[in-house]
Amino acid sequence: EVLEKIEGFDEIYFLYFEDADLCWRAQLAGYELKIAPETMIYHKVSASTSILGKPLILRYHMRNALIFNSLNAPWLVKSILIFWSGYILFKNFLKVFLFPSKTPAGEAIIDGILDFYKNHYGKIT
């Protein structure tokens, strides 16, 4: 019922933040979130993401953090997103040029920010 009413997961994310967005939209639709402490879920760590590699994971995470906040954050947070992402861009440009061993991670974060501003959403191909 909930998934039908809020139209399921938003494919804009593909990976990371889709669960937070789903919960947020469920709350906005009037549903109450609850914790079921008796429920056990076994999560095989990185089963689906280990094949992507760390740089691509960082790229998705950065892009989707920006998407989530641009859609759901309070107006104050939304108003400073461009400055925050500019700071992260600057910091990662420095990382790429000053610390060659961190270049893949820095470039991935830069790409994630650029994906957001270019409206490149969903699965990265």
Image (tube, helix red, strand yellow):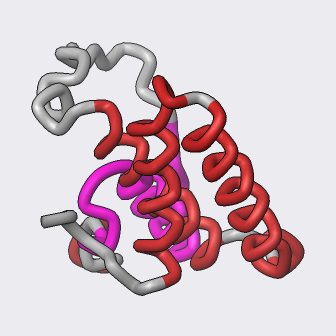
Q: In this view, does 107 lie to the left or right of 45?
A: right
Q: Quadrant of residue 56?
A: top left
Q: Please, which residue is most extreme toward the bottom here?
A: 118
Residue 87, percent across and down? 78, 58
Q: Give the range drawn in magenta.
A: 10-34
Q: Quadrant of residue 75?
A: bottom right
Q: Residue visible at 84% across and 73% down?
A: 80
Front-lying residue, 45 or 29: 45
Residue 76, percent across and down? 88, 75
Q: Identify whether 16 is placed above or below 113.
A: above
Q: Residue visible at 23% across and 18% down?
A: 43
Q: Does the magenta stretch include residue 25?
A: yes
Residue 59, percent across and down? 40, 51
Q: Which quarter of the rendering shows the C terminus?
A: bottom left
Q: Is residue 103 left or right of residue 44?
A: right
Q: Residue visible at 46% across and 37% down?
A: 103
Q: In this view, does 62 lie to the left or right of 57?
A: right
Residue 17, percent across and down? 43, 53
Q: Identify whether 37 is placed above or below 25.
A: above
Q: Does the magenta stretch include residue 96?
A: no
Q: In which quarter of the image is residue 13?
A: bottom left
Q: Which quarter of the rendering shows the N terminus?
A: bottom left
